[in-house]
Amino acid sequence: MSDLMNKNLKILLASFSLITLAGGLFGPLYAVFVEKIGGGLISAGGAYSFFSISAGILIFLMGKWEDRVKHQEKLVLFGYLLNSLGFLGYMFINRPIELFAVQIILGIGEAIWTPAFDSLYTKSLDKGKFASEWGMWDSLHFIITGISAMIGGFIATILGFKFLFLIMFLLSISGTIIVSLLLLSERSRP
């Protein structure tokens, strides 16, 4: 059982790393993009507010419901897929109102996968290594976000936002594919 849990932890960390890398590419460039589509500081703040508030409310509700769900792997997969579609949706934004809609899609995706991911991650921790294995997750989050911010700036400068959004989508889909391995692990359990 310990080998399976360790394998699940690796799958969760790999998929999370790709999702974090995808989102981190855009993070510091967000306000520049909003300005490019005709928005200003109020649009940037408002759109991010839509994401945060929708994610925050729905995470609370989804967490309560997901406690009763048997296959949380499917929820992580579905949430990642919604995030991927949201990242792809950035490619088609021409006005701030469209950005608001994409931010809500991303907030819903985040709300679906986050409680299920946290539950699966917690269940996969090795006894006696809770702090170090949660520390690994936190460490990856900050390091990948920092690296991706720099890379995103270069990509957007050299190749433009559309190419950046395509890369974000592809990274996110890769994370989605990796997390689907949890479903295979679940099916192979005796």
Image (cartoon, rainbow, N blue to C red):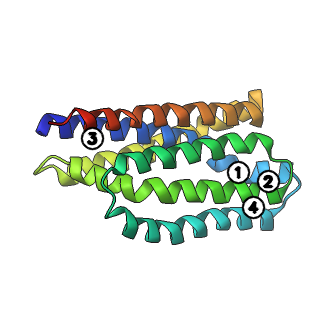
Q: Amino acid at mark 3?
A: Leu
Q: Position of residue 11 (x, y in %)?
A: 33, 35
The disc labelled 2 sits on which kind of residue? Answer: Val
- Between residue 168 and residue 68, name the one nearer to us: 68
Q: Is residue 74 above or below residue 177?
A: below
Q: For marks 2 and 1, give the CA distance.
A: 6 Å
Q: CA distance from mark 3 to mark 2?
A: 36 Å
The residue drawn where x is 30% and y is 45% is 136
Whole-Å distance between the Cαs marked 1 and 3?
31 Å
Q: Earlier in the sequence, mark 1 or mark 3?
A: 3
Say if 83 sits above or below 15 in the image.
below
Which residue has dot 4 on it?
44
Q: Which tag is nearer the camera, tag 4 or tag 3?
A: 3
Which residue is found at the position 50% from the left and 45% from the top? 80
Mark 3 Cα shell of 10 Å, populated few (<14), some (14-19), many (≥20): many
**Which residue is denoted by mark 1 in the rendering?**
30
Task: Please report contact status of discs 4 and 1: CB closer than 8 Å, yes or no.
Answer: yes
